[in-house]
Image (cartoon, helix red, strand yellow):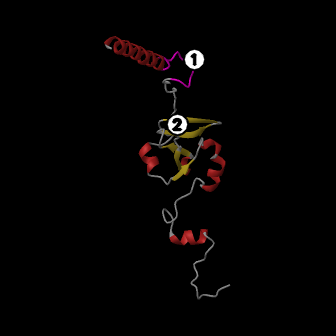
Amino acid sequence: MTTITFRTANLAGWLVGTALLVGLTGCMVDGSNPRMGYRTRPVVQTQATIVITDDYDYYPGYETYYSRNRHEYVYRDGNAWVRRPEPRGIAVNALLALPSVRLAFHDSPELHHNSVVRSYPKNWAPPGKGHDDKDNRKADGKSDRKAGDKRD
């Protein structure tokens, strides 16, 4: 009886071992079947884009722009537009004391200069600064008359 049990145990062990061998063989990956086994992650490249909006201070008295982001002055020199670290014809401190307008362009100021000059002529000053209130009312088309005065 011992012999039969031993053979059955050998046969059972052989069957279990073969089944394990066949089962584990299916886990081997040769790379030809993409659905089986582990796959590597795809390489993803990202690119960060930073958009910097150029913003300018415009000094109408000198028709000069100052880019706060680029730290440069932009102005016309003859027929050409130039970009320099210093303004032309005036010291930086003196220019900073003059009236200025803050503008925001998504491109170069020379593309907008004609409309800027029309809006802010050389003698422009901010409302309430540099002008007498009487002059501002006359410039606005309002007269010095009081509301009850009916002079025509």
Estimate the spatial distance between the alpha carbons at disc 2 and disc 1, rounded to whole Å: 38 Å
Q: Residue at x 64, y 88 (%)?
A: 150
Which quadrant is the N terminus positioned in? top left
- Secondary structure type for disc 1: loop
The range drawn in magenta is 25-36
Q: Which mark is residue 49?
A: 2
The residue lying furthest to the left in this view is 2
Few, some or many residues within 10 Å of mark 1 (<14, 14–19, 20+): few
Q: Is residue 112 left or right of residue 53?
A: right
Q: Position of residue 32 (x, y in %)?
A: 57, 17
Of marks 2 and 1, the one in the foreground: 1
Q: Residue at x 52, y 32 (%)?
A: 47
Q: Position of residue 114 (x, y in %)?
A: 66, 48
Front residue of 119 and 107: 107
Q: What residue is disc 1 on?
A: 32
- Magenta span includes 33: yes
Front residue of 115 and 33: 33
Q: Amino acid at mark 1?
A: Ser
Q: Residue at x 52, y 60 (%)?
A: 126
Above or below residue 24? Residue 148 is below
Q: Position of residue 23 (x, y in %)?
A: 47, 20
- Secondary structure type for disc 2: loop
Q: Position of residue 42 (x, y in %)?
A: 52, 27
The residue lying furthest to the right in this view is 152
Kindly indicate whether the residue at mark 1 contacts the one at mark 2 (C-beta within 8 angstroms).
no
Magenta stretch: helix, strand or loop mostly: loop
